[in-house]
Image (spheres, coloured by chain):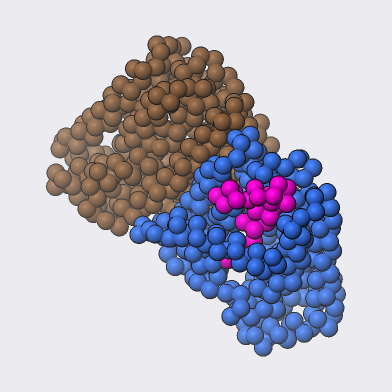
Chain colours: A blue, B brown
Amino acid sequence: MDLQEYLNNVAQDTNLMIRRYFGDTTDTLNKASAHLLLAGGKRLRPAILLLAADAVRKGSSYDLMHAALAVELTHTFTLIHDDIMDRDTERRGVPTVHSFWDEPTAILAGDVLYARAFEFLSRAPAPDSAKMRAVALLAHTCAQICEGQHMDMSFEKRTDVTEGEYLEMVQKKTGTLFAASAAIGAILAGGKSTQVDAVHQFGLLCGIAFQIQDDLIDLISRSERTGKNRASDIRKEKQTLIAIRAREKGIDLTSYRKVHSDKEVDAVVRELRSAGIITEVQETAQQMVERGRKTLTILPESEERKLLLSLGQYFIVRRY
Amino acid sequence: MDLQEYLNNVAQDTNLMIRRYFGDTTDTLNKASAHLLLAGGKRLRPAILLLAADAVRKGSSYDLMHAALAVELTHTFTLIHDDIMDRDTERRGVPTVHSFWDEPTAILAGDVLYARAFEFLSRAPAPDSAKMRAVALLAHTCAQICEGQHMDMSFEKRTDVTEGEYLEMVQKKTGTLFAASAAIGAILAGGKSTQVDAVHQFGLLCGIAFQIQDDLIDLISRSERTGKNRASDIRKEKQTLIAIRAREKGIDLTSYRKVHSDKEVDAVVRELRSAGIITEVQETAQQMVERGRKTLTILPESEERKLLLSLGQYFIVRRY
């Protein structure tokens, strides 16, 4: 099976569960909780969880769809709350929860998914000792995601963010949940601690690369493709790796904070390209993935290990 | 030991842990998370958890301070988020988190405590099977609290809320966390399922009574005593049991939504008193507590069972 086929299958299975548990509701709060879940998504966190489980013990992912859903719910709760803080109006091609309903409903909708994540994780048919480790890891990860989002927001008021600070923020905001997803898969499949550590590290490094690629996509890909407002990072003066590297080369992206049209953004991209910045940022992401892929050598050879390796690469070649 | 002495001890122990884990931080997000925790509180949810544990198996509460802290963190996370939604500016005599910092910080501060609740619960020195039951119950409870808060807000737009709807809302918003706290104590102490169910039901009924008393306190007690803005329920046109019963007797509390001074509020209280509404609402709370106390007859006789019975009564005689 190639990666795209595997991802399609996982997305289909995840969507089926989402429709089953969240699709049929008339209550406003549950509708608001389900809104972004039902609007699609690549379901990459469920995929990395299931692949890590199978890479550790073939066939174990069969039982882990509840756990896979748990990490997708966690991801979605953070999106709903982040959209409020970032005042984003569109995501996955639909209005964000707070803009369709209101802020109080969006806060609660996120809080409900947060709870459901732990509920679904607790239903995984795995030994209680493994599930408790998974619960503790997910909880710790949620706290780190909040720290990452807080760092991200605090960066908006600064113009001197360093590459090290950016990488710490991205590790917390995005890396940790990919890391936890992979580790939870390995833990629930009964993996040894060296295996759990390896897939955790893989998820962390590839997750950082994923976010760097996300920043590139925000700049380069058109809204029709991504379902988000293009170049929102520039308009919000976000301190991305692109902005930091540009600053080092004398290009001040904050001076472009008024860009709106594709034509205007294309001009900025051309300037960054000719300064070599786009290529350099892509190379940094590639190096992260390479480091992540190396950690997987301790896993037995298998189709799932191969798919995990491809997944890491996919994180940085995707265009949306 | 009398109840007040017991509660003082629990509050002291809880405060000690809070200072240990949350007291010493320079980071803005962690400060915001710790803000309401450090501002005091009666620590009634830790108390009911520890008492239920000891009532089931004497001496078992000794190990459960992490679990006790977990339910206090859960409570505090809901306060932080509710204050944003309700636009409250003061609580426990200090500014609310979103008014001292800002809304994004308050959303994240709540989210951090939410995570820490599950982290602390996962650290309880109890069998994994018991802890998994506790985690699942806490998660389910968090979702119900959100539903209760959403119902509460949706009531503000209505003038025809029934007593049944009010009681369902209060059960979810306030009853379930007292119920879960007691049940988690019993579960982690190794209680039989009949015992767990009994203390859960006790917590639920007394928790509903607690909220009814809270509504009375909002109306009757002065701000200096409560640390909250007096009569905020009337100004927000909240559909409390008082408002519902008043409406049935031809008193429209929404017509008093402009009251501010103690003199004005005192006049409203006098009108409600002479219509017999205050007494009737107090009787309803008393009946709830009586029903709750009856469920405890299946527990062995002990000092802790007596203290639990007193705690139920305390919920409806307290003045702040």
Residue A259, compared with residue B96, is above or below; it is below
Query: Over which residues does the magenta segment extend?
Result: A41-67
Q: Is residue B54 magenta?
A: no
Which residue is located at x 50 percent, y 60 percent?
A: A16
Vertical side of A256 occupied by A296: above or below = above
Residue sitting at x 33%, y 31%: B205
Question: Is residue A59 highlighted in magenta?
Answer: yes
Question: Is residue A14 shown left or right of residue A176?
Answer: left
**As displayed, is residue A159 above or below residue A298?**
below
x then y, percent, for residue A171: 73, 55
Residue drawn at the location 40% of the way across and 24% of the way down: B194
Using residue B286 as the reference point, say whether residue A53 is left or right of it: right
**Quarter assignment of residue A124:** top right
Across and down, in percent, residue B1 comes to 46, 11
- Residue B145 visible to an observer of this rendering: yes
Q: Is residue B99 visible?
A: no
The residue shown at (32%, 26%) is B292
